[in-house]
Image: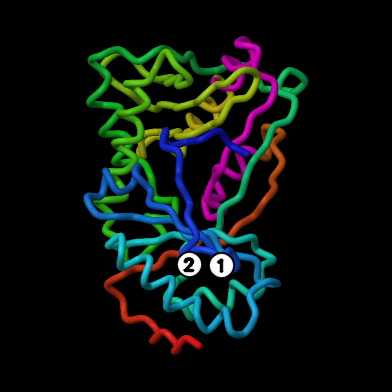
Amino acid sequence: MPLLRSGFELHYEEIQPGAPALGTAALLPWDTEIFGFPVASYRAGSDEALNEAARKDLAAHFYSWMTRYRVSVCGCVIPVGSLFWKSFLPELGFRFVDFGIEARLRNLPSAPLPKIRAALRSPEPEDRLAIETLAVRSFAHGRYFADPLFPRELAERRYRRWIANALDGVGGLDRVYVLGERGSVDGFFHVAVQGQVADLRLAAVAPELQSTGMGFDLYVSVLHELNKMGVRRIVTSISAANTAVMNLYSLLGFRFAHPEMIYHWHAALPRPAAPPSG
C-alpha cells in the first residue's frame, strides 16, 4: 500500500462500542484543518456479520457518531466487488463520487525507461509561489473535484496546502522536483521515499503545456532520479478517471491493483430517516 500520505495517524473507533459489524469512523485532521470544518472517514464493517437487526441499527448509530463530532463531510472507500455496501451506502445518504486505483512498479532497476529529455532541479525559495499557484491551476481529478456538491475552491486549497507542506518537509521523506527555469515553474513532482519504496504523490504540469509531452518527460525524469537513489519499488494511488495519467503509467510499465469505489456523505443533504432500533 502507499505510504501514509497526510502525516496524520488516523484513530478509528467503533460507531457503536462492542458492535464492530457496524463499522468504524475517524476524523481526518488533515482535511479538517484545511477546510475549516470536521471531515471524517467511515470504514464499513463486514456485511457477513451484519445481520438484519444490526442493519436496522446502523443508520441511527452512524448519524449519531457524525452528529457527535459535527462532521460535515464523510468519505467511505469500498472494494468494487462489495455488492452489499454498494447498495447500502446510498441508504445511509452516501453518494458515489470517484473510482480509485493503485498503480505499482515492482522493480524499477529493471524497468526499460525512456531516455531523459527534461532536466529536473530542486525548488528554490523564489519558486514557491509559482509552485503553489500551479497546484491550484492544474488539477481536475480526485474525490473532492469529482464531488459535485463540494466547493472547487476548497479542493484547490487542499492541493495548494499539500505542496506547501511538501516543500516545508523536503529533507525528510519528502522530495520535490521542478521543471523550468528559476522563478518560472513548468511542472513539479512531489515524491515520498522511505528506504527502497517511493510513493508518487502529486505531479502537475502547467495547463498550457499539458498537450506537449512535458508530463511524460516529467515522469520519466523522476523515475530516473529515484533509480539513482536506490529505489526499487514504486506505489501510488490515482483516480481511475484520470485516464491520461493511467495511460502514462502503462507506458512506463506500471500495473494496476485494488480498484475501489469512493463515496461521500454530506451532513447538509436530505438523508433517509433512521429506522427505529430494536
Does dot 1 land on a helix, a strand or a loop?
A: loop
Q: Which amino acid, mark 1?
A: Ala
Q: Which mark is residue 19?
A: 1
Q: Are marks 2 and 1 in contact (CB under 8 Å)?
A: yes
Count of numbered marks: 2
Question: Magenta part of the protein: which range?
Answer: 222-249
Q: Position of residue 26 (x, y in %)?
A: 43, 53
Crowd around label 2: few <14 · some 14–19 · many ≥20 (10 Å): some
Q: Quadrant of the N terminus?
A: top right
Q: Residue furthest front?
A: 18
Mark 1 neighbour class, 10 Å CA radius: few under 14, some 14 to 19, many 20 or more: some
- 225 falls in the magenta region: yes
Name the residue beneath numbered marker 2: 16
The amino acid beneath tag 2 is Gln
Q: Is residue 149 above or below residue 114?
A: below
Residue 136 lies left or right of residue 250; in this view the side is: left
Cα distance in 3D space between marks 2 and 1: 6 Å
Name which quarter of the figure residue 79 lies in.
bottom right
Residue 124: horizontal and vertical position, in percent? 30, 12
User: What percent of the width, then of the height, locates residue 237?
Assistant: 56, 43
